Amino acid sequence: MQEVSRSGAAGELRLDALIADLWWRVRLLNTDILELEAKSGLFDVHQPTYPLLALNLRARRDNLVSTIGVLEERAKSVSEAA
């Protein structure tokens, strides 16, 4: 029984570390998006001349945030099961 609980705790820690790392990457993407917007002087994504790279970075960021939500739910269910 102890072996299972140790591996469960280790898995929970790894999941928390992964979530923290993904939030760090989201912050990096936000910084990159803001820099691109500042360089171009365009902050409205609906403008036809809005930087394509910024649009791609926004999509990546949004996908990461969605993934983080799923992982946080999984972490919550794992901690409730323990």
Image (cartoon, rainbow, N blue to C red):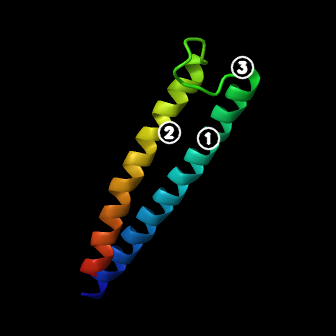
Q: Residue at x 38, y 62 (%)?
A: 72
Q: Nearer the viewer, mark 3 or mark 1?
A: 3
Name above or below for residue 80 compared with residue 66. Answer: below
**Residue at numbered disc 2:** 61
Q: Residues within 10 Å of mark 3 (few under 14, many from 20)?
A: few
| Disc marking residue 40 | 3
Question: In terms of image quadrants, where is residue 28?
Answer: top right
Q: Residues within 10 Å of mark 2 (few under 14, many from 20)?
A: many
Q: Residue furthest right?
A: 39
Q: Please, what secondary structure does the residue beneath circle 3 have?
A: helix
Depth check: give the residue in front, 1 or 72: 72
The CA distance from mark 3 to mark 2 is 20 Å
Q: For the C terminus, give its image quadrant.
A: bottom left
Q: Residue at x 37, y 68 (%)?
A: 11
**Amino acid on which the number 1 mark rests in the picture:** Asn
The CA distance from mark 1 to mark 2 is 8 Å
Question: In terms of image quadrants, where is residue 43?
Answer: top right
**Residue at numbered disc 1:** 30
Name above or below for residue 19 compared with residue 30. Answer: below
